[in-house]
Amino acid sequence: MGTGNPTDKKSNNNLETQRYRFFNHQFELRSDHQETLSLMDTMFRCFAVTDKRNGGDISRYEVVTHADGQAVIHTPDQSFPLESPSLLPSLAHGLILRHTLAQVSSHVLFHAASLSYQEKGIILAADSGCGKTTLALALVRQGFQFLSDEVAALAFPAGELAPYPRCLWVRAGTYQLFEQLGWEMPTHSTAAEISNRAAIHLSAELLGATCRPEHLILLQRPDAGDERICKVTLNSLPQRLLRSLEEIGIQPEILPDATDKFPCFRVKEKHITKIHETCEGHGVFLLNVDETAVDSDYYKNTPKLQKISKLTAALALLRNFVGSYRSEFIQQHCQGTAVGVIEPLVKILAPVQCYQLTPGRLDHSVEIIHALCQPEKKRCAQYTGR
């Protein structure tokens, strides 16, 4: 593994350039690998910057292939060689996205879905695999406007909820569930189909604008008492990486690799962010994080809604914070510590009503949230399931 952006075998004149803006930060991708360029265009078309003139701080990345079959991903301060170019699109996408979101200082970002209803915002915060995308799409067909299914972005210090309209990855299970309920998917175009997922863009009229958040709902899995375990696949597993993980208190359970091309281990989901950072420090890629899927019985339960305190909501959101202690937001606004996010976040949440929802039947969950977002004079008695 090298550092910086060393000279490649190919001339930079052969590289195609794409530029994107995420809130107050821009990045530029230069590559000769069409599949990588295509994936970035598919996922972040709404973030594209057409004016290529220099303006402000821009992070530059290069994804370059060589005649010998190898490839390399250059970040602003590091280089990641890769023997199999077939892995380039997903690896480059993940690496660039994590680095770029960590550079955003104008907004505090969380892993969450966000929507608006009658120009008032709603945040649906949950771990991966809790059905955020499915619930967000179900709410869109009920008249909500879509802001994001992945990142909730709160402007700092104003607290406004901003759109993050990336392409949605929709699992086959979502389509099946909609069919069972006799629902049509919201109007969309399909950009790609890979394995059991489809990449879709919702039609423009379904997309919302910046708004004030009014409700925050934490989606609580029925099995939340058990620590979720993920299967992590890496492109390599050197001993120095294992030692680094052990030094920060992570003890991965190594899995037999007789049937797998790449090494795998099991680890608690709460450690995934630290594992990403540690792996990148060793020039190792996370190829896949296999999270526990939502069981089909999950949508047969009775949904329940209960109010929670602002501090409880802020602490739960902090667990879903996008970035690390090195993120520009934390460095500029929180004295370099993630704990410093709590105080400004509680202030932002002061006018927001905070709840915890144990989801169940999708149609009932939609009814609960829809009733919650109605004007007070039209609001039904609090609905907690049938």
Image (spheres, rainbow, N blue to C red):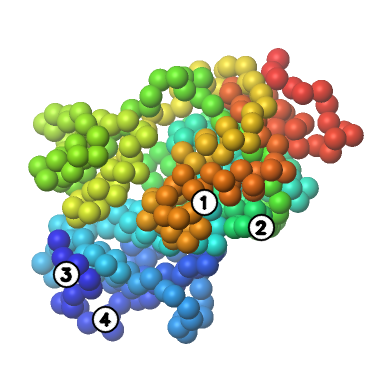
Residue at the spot of label 1? 109
Q: Secondary structure at mark 1?
A: strand
Residue at the spot of label 3? 66
Give amino acid for label 1: Leu
Mark 2 is surrounded, within 10 Å at the Cα level, by few (under 14), some (14 to 19) or many (20 or more) other residues, namely: few
Looking at marks 1 and 4 on the same chain, the residue that comes earlier in the sequence is marked by: 4
Residue drawn 62% across the image and 57% down it: 157
Q: Depth-wise, is mark 3 or mark 2 nearer the camera?
A: 2
Rendered image quadrant of residue 204: bottom right
Looking at marks 3 and 4 on the same chain, the residue that comes earlier in the sequence is marked by: 4
Question: Vertically, is 355 above or below 200?
Answer: above
Give amino acid for label 2: Ala
Q: Depth-wise, is mark 1 or mark 3 nearer the camera?
A: 1
Give amino acid for label 3: His
Find out whether the residues at labels 1 and 3 contact each other: C-beta distance under 8 Å: no
In the picture, the disc for residue 82 is none
**Which quadrant is home to the N terminus?**
bottom left
Residue at the spot of label 4? 12
Question: Vertically, is 105 above or below 262?
Answer: below
